[in-house]
Image (cartoon, coloured by chain):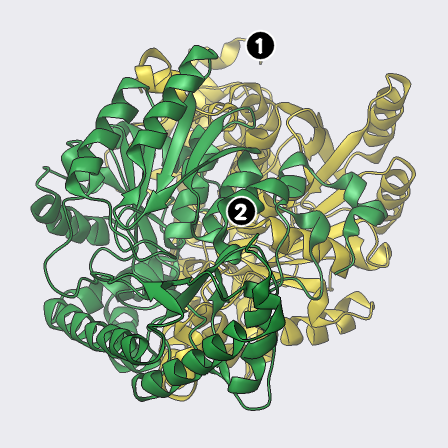
Chain colours: A yellow, B green
Amino acid sequence: VTPAAESPLAAQLSERAQRAGAAYAGPGAGHDVPQGDRPPIAFTGGLPDPGLLPAERLAEATADVLRTDGNDALQYGGAQGWAGLREWLAERWSAKDAVALTPSHFTLTNGSAGALANVCETFVDPTDIVGVEAFSFPGSVRAIRSFTPRIECLPLDDDGLDVDALEALLRDLERRGERMRLLYTIATFHNPTGSTLSVARRQRLIDLCTRHDVLIAEDDAYGELFFGDEPPPSLYSLAGGKGVVKLGSFSKIVAPGLRVGWSQAEPAVVDALVATRSDLGTSPLLIRVLSRFLAEGFEEHLAGLRHAYAGKCRSMLDALGEHCAGTATWNQPGGGFFVWVTLREHVTPDALADACPAEGVSFVGGHVFSSERIAGDGRRMAWGPGDSRFLRLAFSYVAGDTIPEGILRLGAVLSRAAQMPQSMAPLS
Amino acid sequence: VTPAAESPLAAQLSERAQRAGAAYAGPGAGHDVPQGDRPPIAFTGGLPDPGLLPAERLAEATADVLRTDGNDALQYGGAQGWAGLREWLAERWSAKDAVALTPSHFTLTNGSAGALANVCETFVDPTDIVGVEAFSFPGSVRAIRSFTPRIECLPLDDDGLDVDALEALLRDLERRGERMRLLYTIATFHNPTGSTLSVARRQRLIDLCTRHDVLIAEDDAYGELFFGDEPPPSLYSLAGGKGVVKLGSFSKIVAPGLRVGWSQAEPAVVDALVATRSDLGTSPLLIRVLSRFLAEGFEEHLAGLRHAYAGKCRSMLDALGEHCAGTATWNQPGGGFFVWVTLREHVTPDALADACPAEGVSFVGGHVFSSERIAGDGRRMAWGPGDSRFLRLAFSYVAGDTIPEGILRLGAVLSRAAQMPQSMAPLS
């Protein structure tokens, strides 16, 4: 990567582009996963299973929309997005969130990533403080960082965000005459850790944010994909809709390639989000296609997804127990796409990076999800020897029948790494 | 409109949201066209003719893409957008712009509106000065205003932007130790005035911007829709690709509802645009559908659009000559969607607004496109008695066979207004 910081262009970039890391863009940016001797079984991508993408039904829905509603679907559709899909969302989430919602509580966005950018552009100035979990989805932290360099990273554990740490931080900020403007949290089936915020912590988090006037951006990309019991009520639900923007997405439950998500918030907040946006709205064609798709058999579709991902998760957990119990520990996710692995102390990440490629398995090192690193310089990081003892394993995308073999290989990697000289050094 | 400025929410808005006018959002925002006794023949919307939207072929292309390439189309597609469509753009525009272009010269965006927002977020800070034409597309000026309040409005005439005025402004800024960061211009088949920047002015504009280090954002939404001769070479072409970002769109030549456009610029600039963007890219499904659509018969499709819009424009100009020659003058657009009408001095806008509804014709008052008004407070303006003697007539969307009757009604409106007492007052 040649930092454009050395080029004349860097001097032309906006402060926002510099914070977004544009000065470091160029060939080689992004994850540079080492390639080994045989094609890896890849636990890398947080993507839906290709076999679960409803391609045929989306083609039928598109044909139907274009035949019956072609002009509305192909003209401009407005910044808030077609009311028909917002009515569907209002009905569904009124029931699930136990709050009376109308189409005015929703605005349709370019995925939940577009929703988060819209929330930030509407509510975050470059002098504002935003809280995030210490491990988080890097795309979100990078987006937030483009709006403000002042990011506070909060620890999290198996029960989600550490609310004591949040309280201490908010009090400390108050003492210094400052405040947190926005708290971004993935409370349910967290990416990358798979953790879910407990109900008790949810309630305390809402109380704290209410008292300290902190807007909550609740990223709920995975909440529909539970494997057993339904997850706890959303922050939006527990807060009665006040002070929370819930970011929703069809990426995990229909298809990422539609790039359709939404923000759910009080109508006055939604009005502000809509007014601040300037790209003339998300495709009215795709919004109508989704709406048509959702009108029939959606519960069966969702049940199928839950069943399939639960099975893949189970398969991964079983194989981990068989092959990795001596070298690592991991969580038991209640839903979502990810298992978060913690290496035992006698395996260092350096040794791991050396041992990995030859075995034909790949995953994402935990350091890639370190909010502190992303907040620190906004630079996209290459995979490699690092400073974390965590791995994210995605079971969602990989072919289900290769999961046991992939984890067998991972076990071999971990055992081999544990015997390498680098692993004699203490963990950084 | 109840200004949210009076609500607690207003204090929470980012500076950007405040500049975007979010404090004024809410019911009643937008154009409030007076309704009369009979349904108006509407010359209001700058939209494609519904009969020219290729709904059936897009449905076929979607089915084809989802059958043969469903997984790539339905997963994430990256921030720059699928290379296949960028290759098509590179080939087409290398020929038309006479510059050697590669896929690295393009990034696909959520319409050209998304492209402009992306250019602004990458290059414009809130302290920067941006130049725009004194009449322009309000969505663009409003977007720019959300990034900086420092907007300079440049006069334009039948030959486009007044380059003498630009030179005077740039010199004045230089004397004050300031500079213009970005110049946004619709050089070809301008919205709303229909004017096209002459070749001589294009060359001078590039020389001035090069000398004063001003980045040019060239909005080329209408350039493909010429009625006779091709328009002059783009600014991008004349500048050899240096210092210009050309904003392209499929909205006018395929369909707005796809929300796909692009930025065309030097690869280093494109890299910065891509790195700054945070919504995970434009729908890879729609990008592939477009690509499939463009692969066959696109020249015939374009020729059909040019022929149809040329006919509708001719029909409007003929009818104006017949019914409005005594009360107004107008330009002869070489392409695009709009005729720009200048009222003769004995017709005031106030009288016009009073006379209009009963006749059953509608259009957009020129004041709606006044960059100075939009830059002044960012507030969305209602149609009504105003401060301009200009009208924008769109011939694109209205049914072609109703144009003569619509202009007949407009003529009646103008004649009636000319005899109303308000018109005795001098023009403001």
**Image x and y of residue A320, in percent:** 53, 44
> In the shown orientation, is residue A217 left or right of residue A100?
left
**Image x and y of residue B134, in percent:** 44, 44
Q: Which residue in the structure is indicated by mark 1? A: A426
- Which sits in the foreground, A386 or B199? B199
Residue at the (56%, 50%) spot, across then down: A277
Residue type of the residue flagged with mark 1: Pro
Tag in front: 2 or 1: 2
Residue type of the residue flagged with mark 2: Arg
Q: Secondary structure at mark 2?
A: helix
- Asked if one can make out residue A29 in the rendered structure from this viewpoint, the answer is no
Compared with residue A333, is residue A387 higher up or lower down, i.e. above or below?
above
Tell me the crowding category of disc 1: few under 14, some 14 to 19, or many 20 or more residues within 10 angstroms, Cα based: few
- Which sits in the foreground, A209 or B248? B248
Compared with residue B12, is residue A290 higher up or lower down, i.e. above or below?
below
**Image x and y of residue B93, in percent:** 14, 47
Which subunit holds the residue at mark 2? Answer: B
Residue at the (25%, 31%) spot, across then down: B205
Residue at the (81%, 58%) spot, across then down: A241
Compared with residue B404, is residue A316 higher up or lower down, i.e. above or below?
above
Q: Which residue in the structure is indicated by mark 2? A: B142
Disc 2 from disc 1: Cα separation: 56 Å
Tell me the crowding category of disc 2: few under 14, some 14 to 19, or many 20 or more residues within 10 angstroms, Cα based: many
Furthest residue in direction top, as rendered: A425
Q: Secondary structure at mark 1?
A: loop
**Image x and y of residue B293, in percent:** 21, 69
- Which sits in the foreground, A63 or A228? A63
Which subunit holds the residue at mark 1? Answer: A
- Asked if one can make out residue A253 in the rendered structure from this viewpoint, the answer is yes
